[in-house]
Every structure is written in structure tokens, then in C-alpha cells.
Image (spheres, helix red, strand yellow):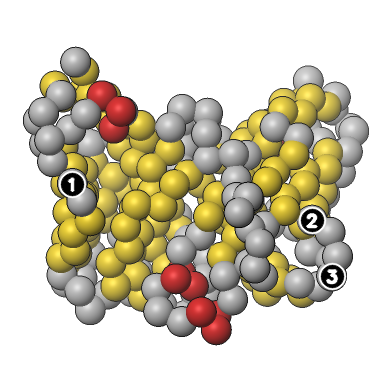
Amino acid sequence: NAGVMQNPRHLVRRRGQEARLRCSPMKGHSHVYWYRQLPEEGLKFMVYLQKENIIDESGMPKERFSAEFPKEGPSILRIQQVVRGDSAAYFCASSPPNSYGGIAKNIQYFGAGTRLSVL
Amino acid sequence: SQQGEEDPQALSIQEGENATMNCSYKTSINNLQWYRQNSGRGLVHLILIRSNEREKHSGRLRVTLDTSKKSSSLLITASRAADTASYFCATVQTGGGNKLTFGTGTQLKVEL
């Protein structure tokens, strides 16, 4: 049972370009989360999605950032017109449906992350 | 604002010793979790403690939670070199949905 898969692992972009980060959740998981980690810091929540729905985007910057989790295919975090300050590690996590009950639905499983470098 | 502050920021111990990390948070929570991150890797879930629990064990891990002080501690007993990693506490806030709010982390180094 494959874990959470993120690609690419490393992404280099020049200022003004677009960055697309992909995340395939664990099999059977319907909830996806994106987090950003700056060097030497903890993770900061960005957005929480279920299939075809954005549930909580309170951590997303108001401009240039968007996320989707379509009915088919991976979740995508898109950053338009990247700036140097966007350089960070972006982690995706998934969790099972609420129907699992107990503590299982509260545990998030993380991918290895995408390290974005903006030149 | 930072939900979780962890203490210490860095900890260096000898193999076989115990390691204790502390976490404080600001808001009412449903549960508190501890995660581990090896350098350059993703996070791995270690243990979850609900807001109505005071202590929980899992193998060499012991977690305590004091909701009156809004604090938690993670104890790793009989540490090993392989325990070298960063450790983060994360809370699920009451009414905050499923999102995790992470602390700043403790970097643990276990030396042979």
C-alpha cells in the first residue's frame, strides 16, 4: 500500500514562472492537506481539501496560490508568478474518511515533500 | 501567531539516556499529536493524545497532556542514535476542523 506520493521532489523555478506541485493521497484516503515549511521552522497549514471541494483555505495566501483535488487524479497546489519568498518545502498529507471513526481519522500521513527553489 | 512553542529548541544526549521535549499551545484543543521528521524528509506520526487523556504510552514513548497549563511533554526512553530527528507537536483545535497547527520543533541529537 503506497504512502502519500508527492512529485516532483525538487522543483526549481525562476521568478515569475508557475510552479505545480502534485500529491496522490494514500489509497482509501479522501482528505488532503497542504503545508509549507520554511527552513528551521515548523509546518504551516495552507489548505484542506476533499474530493472536488475546498474545505478550509484559511492558510492560503490570497493571491497567486490555488489548490484543487479533482474527482480523478492527484491534488495540485499551484503557485503562479513565483517569488523568492515562495522557496520552501511543501508537504502534502492525507487522512482517511471521517467514517473511520476513533483516532484513525485524526492521523495525517505525510509525503516526502516538494522542495521549491525560486531563483 | 505560533500555536505551539517547543522547548528546548535543540537537545543533545548520549545513547541510552532519556530525552524529554515540551510543547505549549494557546487554544482549546481536541487532541495533540507528536510527529517526527528526519532531515529532508516528511513527517511521521508518533502518538496522539486526546484532550480528555492525561498520559499515553507507545513503546519507548510517553506523552503527557495538561490542558489546564496548555502543555504537553514527550519522553523518549533509552534513546538510540536512530532517534536523531526533529520532533514536532501539533494540535487539532476545537472547532478548527482537521487541520494541524504545528509547534516550532525540537531538534534531538543522540550521540553514540
Q: Is residue A3 visible?
A: yes
| CA gap, disc 3 and disc 1 | 41 Å
Residue A9 falls in image quadrant? top right
Residue A89 found in image quarter: top right
Q: Chain of mark 1?
A: B
Determine whether A85 is above or below B30 in the image: above
Mark 1 surroundings within 10 Å by alpha-carbon count, few (fewer than 14), some (14 through 19), many (20 or more): few
Residue ID for mark 1: B60
Quadrant occupied by the N terminus of chain B: bottom left
Residue B50 horizontal side relative to residue A54, left or right: left
In this rendering, do the residues under marks 1 and 2 share a single chain?
Answer: no
Tag 1's secondary structure? loop
- Residue assigned mark 3: A71
Q: Chain of mark 3?
A: A
| Position of residue B99 measured from the top left corner of the image (x, y, whole percent) | 52, 65
User: Which residue is at the far right?
Assistant: A17
Disc 3 + disc 2, Cβ < 8 Å: no
Kindly report the distance in space between the C-alpha atoms of the residues bearing marks 3 and 2: 9 Å
Q: What quarter of the picture does the C terminus of chain B occupy? A: top left
Q: Secondary structure at mark 3?
A: loop
In the image, B6 versus B87, the foreground residue is: B87
Question: Dot 2, how many residues are within 10 Å of its Cα: few (below 14), some (14-19), or many (20+)?
Answer: some
In the structure shown, which secondary structural element does the residue marked by tag 2 occupy?
loop
Q: Residue at left 14%, top 21%?
A: B14
**Viewed as shown, does residue A93 lie left or right of A78?**
left
On screen, residue B25 above or below A38: below
Look at 83% across and 27% down and name the residue there: A13
Which residue ends up furthest to the top in the rendered image? B112
Q: Horizontally, is A55 left or right of B33 in the view?
A: right
Look at mark 2 in the image and give the residue it sits on: A74
Task: Name the kind of residue labelled 1 in the image.
Answer: Arg
